[in-house]
Image (cartoon, grey):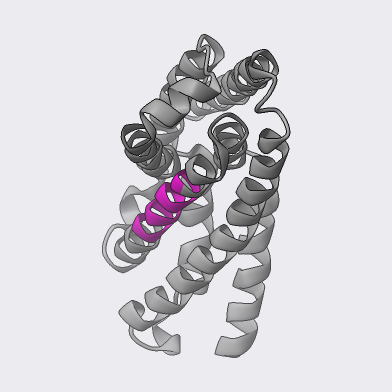
Amino acid sequence: MTYAENLGLFTLLLAGIITVPGMDMIFVTANALTGGRRAGVAATSGIMLGGAFHTLFGTVAVATLSTLVPQLAGPMLVIGAAYMIWIGYTLARSAIVIDDIEASRLHRTARIFTQGLITCLINPKAWLFILAVYPQFMRPEYGPFWRQALVMGALTLLLQATVYGGLALAAAKGRDALTSKPQVTIWIGRAAGWLLVAVAVLMLVEGWRSW
């Protein structure tokens, strides 16, 4: 298989894992619906930075830590799922209204960015993808690992920006139509929170079984 064919197959798999609904997608949508465009972009940016860290980890794992892969999968699932349960529960119990968002916009944006970063970093789906896929596509015959990592990382950021960014903007437009109905916004945020909890619980069970 040529490097171009290898990279094309990796891109298809990457696009699939990003577009499949999961914790990152729910997190972006929930924040865009409740906080508007700024919150959606902050969530997306945090997740993109997390994607860059995933690429770095994948490179290190392939180059020097491949023997630790089996031991890391279970704990990462459990830790990531537990954190997402907490985020979802917090969102489900919140009562976010438009006035509160506007009054603390800068603080809220920074907090959402940080949560997006942490959400991506401990997202079980992302870690499983890295641990399962990177060793198959990052090979010595394709050149230095750092150069392969730059290309794969750039593809990750591009697809995350396209999928999650587009979703955030679309959700923000829907949120703009709800600004005159704060109670509806509150219930949308709570519903998204409980959905996040449900997904995280399933991942927690899977992680506990594999640990």
> At which x and y percent is residue 21?
68, 41
In the picture, residue 79 is in which quadrant?
Answer: top left
Residue shown at 29% from the left, 57% from the top: 65
> At which x and y percent is residue 46?
40, 48
Instruction: Give yes or no for residue 108 being in the magenta stretch.
Output: no
> At which x and y percent is residue 100?
45, 21
In screen coordinates, is 100 left or right of 30?
left
Say which of 21 and 184 sits in front.
184
Name the residue at the top extreme. 93
Region of the chain picked out in magenta, as a range? 42-53
In screen coordinates, is 83 left or right of 170?
left
> At which x and y percent is residue 34?
58, 29
**One can see residue 118 in this view:** yes
Q: Is residue 119 above or below residue 201?
A: below
Q: Is residue 188 above or below residue 122?
A: above
Instruction: Give yes or no for residue 52 being in the magenta stretch.
Output: yes
In the picture, residue 117 is in which quadrant?
Answer: top left
Q: Quadrant of the N terminus?
A: bottom right
